[in-house]
Image (cartoon, rainbow, N blue to C red):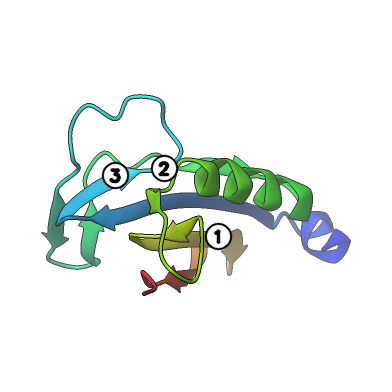
Amino acid sequence: MSEGKANGTTYSTEVSYLEIYNERVKDLLTRDQTHSLRVREHPRHGPYVEDLSKHLVTNYAGIQDVMNRGNANRTTASTNMNDVSSRSHAIFTMTFSQASFVDGLPAETVSKIHLVDLAGR
């Protein structure tokens, strides 16, 4: 990545974490859990969750910290096979952005990875 910085290229990684439980969408990384979030559709970018928080991370430890914080806020219940079974679907999203100049014009490449955990039995 040091080559990119020398050429004026910048990188950033943002993460978000949500759960879907009883048809309600909840941000697992905010303290305010008084209302469920709304799923919307952007004409160009597709579906998104309105008001979902995004958190800037700079290394793997930061990603782990955010994921652990979100996991602690997930809805769980006891089952016959597991005392702390996940009762919700969860989506952890990492968005990696690379910004640079190509032929003197600004250019940006954005990649997203969605890690999905479906509720178990």
Quadrant, the C terminus = bottom left
Which residue shows up at 62% across the image and 51% down it? 12
Horizontally, residue 31 falls left or right of residue 48, namely: right
What residue is drawn where x is 43% and y is 48%?
74
Would residue 117 be found to the left or right of residue 71 on screen?
left
Nearest to the observer: residue 45 or residue 87: 87
Measured as percent of width and height from the top left, residue 73 is found at 46, 41
- The amino acid beneath tag 3 is Lys
Q: Which mark is residue 97?
A: 1
Quarter of the image with the N terminus is bottom right
Is there a contact, CB below 8 Å, between mark 3 and mark 1? Answer: no
Tell me the CA gap for discs 3 and 1: 25 Å
- Give yes or no for contact between labels 3 and 2 (Cβ–Cβ under 8 Å): yes
Residue at the disc numbered 2 = 28
Residue shown at 65% from the left, 45% from the top: 57
Image point (53%, 42%), residue name: 72
Q: Secondary structure at mark 1?
A: strand
Above or below — where is 1 with respect to 37? below
Mark 3 — residue? 26
Q: Position of residue 91 (x, y in %)?
A: 40, 62
Q: Is 69 situated above or below 93?
A: above
- Residue 37: x and y in percent read 19, 43
Q: Which of the two labelled residues, at mark 2 and mark 1, occupies the earlier sequence position?
A: 2
* Side of 23 relative to 112 (left or right): left
Q: Regarding mark 3 in the picture, which secondary structure is present there? A: strand
Tell me which numbered mark, 3 or 1, is placed earlier along the sequence: 3
- Look at label 1 and name its amino acid: Ser
Label annotation for residue 42: none
Give the crowd class for mark 2: few <14, some 14-19, many >=20 residues within 10 Å. Answer: many
Q: At label 2, which amino acid type do we have?
A: Leu
Q: Residues within 10 Å of mark 1 (few under 14, many from 20)?
A: some
